[in-house]
Amino acid sequence: MLTKNLLESIRVVKENERKAADFYAQAAQTTGNSMGRELFEQLSEFEQFHYERLTALEKQLEASGDFIYYEGKEFPLPPEIVPRAAQEPQHQSIMNIISQALGLERQAEQAYAELARQITDAQGHAMFRRLSEEEHLHYLILNEAYWNLTNLKTWKWSLA
């Protein structure tokens, strides 16, 4: 992959991460449930972390053409206490937010997987593969939260 194309791809996914962080921060303010707010805040922080690491990668590639080491980030465990039938005053709005978020996570997962396939540098390949895996985990968490809200009327998710 040509460096110019790689840098442009990184700028695109970096901007997507910024938008995702903002999206989740807004979603956290929308929900009336503390567990839902915590999930969205964690996702916002995670996407901000991705943005910061991609910015570091972009700078390193521009300066030396070398990839950076990506240490990854672990998603925090969900709260132990799960209230019964958590009331979500903005239920339909939250379901729409989660549906949009599922699409964002799937798109990010695929974008990083595609970059990983195109990168021959071992460290760069590992970074993009890990980013894809992290986005896939976000997708699974959101999918589980959606299912639980739909079927059990409660905010609950696991780390799959």
Image (cartoon, rainbow, N blue to C red):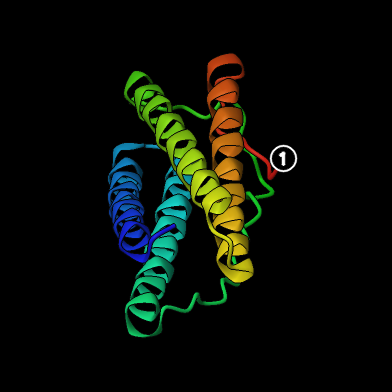
**Which residue corresponds to the image point at 49% horizontal and 34% vertical from the top-left?**
106
**Which residue corresponds to the image point at 29% horizontal and 38% vertical from the top-left?**
30
68 or 86: nearer the viewer: 68
Q: Is residue 38 left or right of residue 74?
A: left
Q: How many marks?
A: 1
Q: Is residue 77 left or right of residue 16?
A: right
Percent across and percent down for residue 100 are 37, 29
**Image quarter of residue 33:** top left
Q: Amino acid at mark 1?
A: Ala
**Image quarter of residue 34:** top left
Q: Is residue 73 visible?
A: no
* Quarter of the image with the C terminus in it: top right
60 or 96: nearer the viewer: 60
33 or 78: nearer the viewer: 78
**Image quarter of residue 152:** top right
**Which residue corresponds to the image point at 69% horizontal and 49% vertical from the top-left?**
80
Give the residue furthest to the front.
2
Give the residue furthest to the right.
160
Percent across and percent down for residue 86 are 52, 29
Percent across and percent down for residue 65 are 41, 78
38 or 115: nearer the viewer: 115
Percent across and percent down for residue 81 are 66, 45
Secondary element at tag 1: loop
In the rendered image of this protein, does residue 96 appear above or below residue 151?
Answer: below
Q: Residue tagged by mark 1?
A: 160
In the rendered image of this protein, does residue 6 appear above or below residue 89?
Answer: below
* Quarter of the image with the N terminus in it: bottom left
In the rendered image of this protein, does residue 75 appear above or below residue 60?
Answer: above
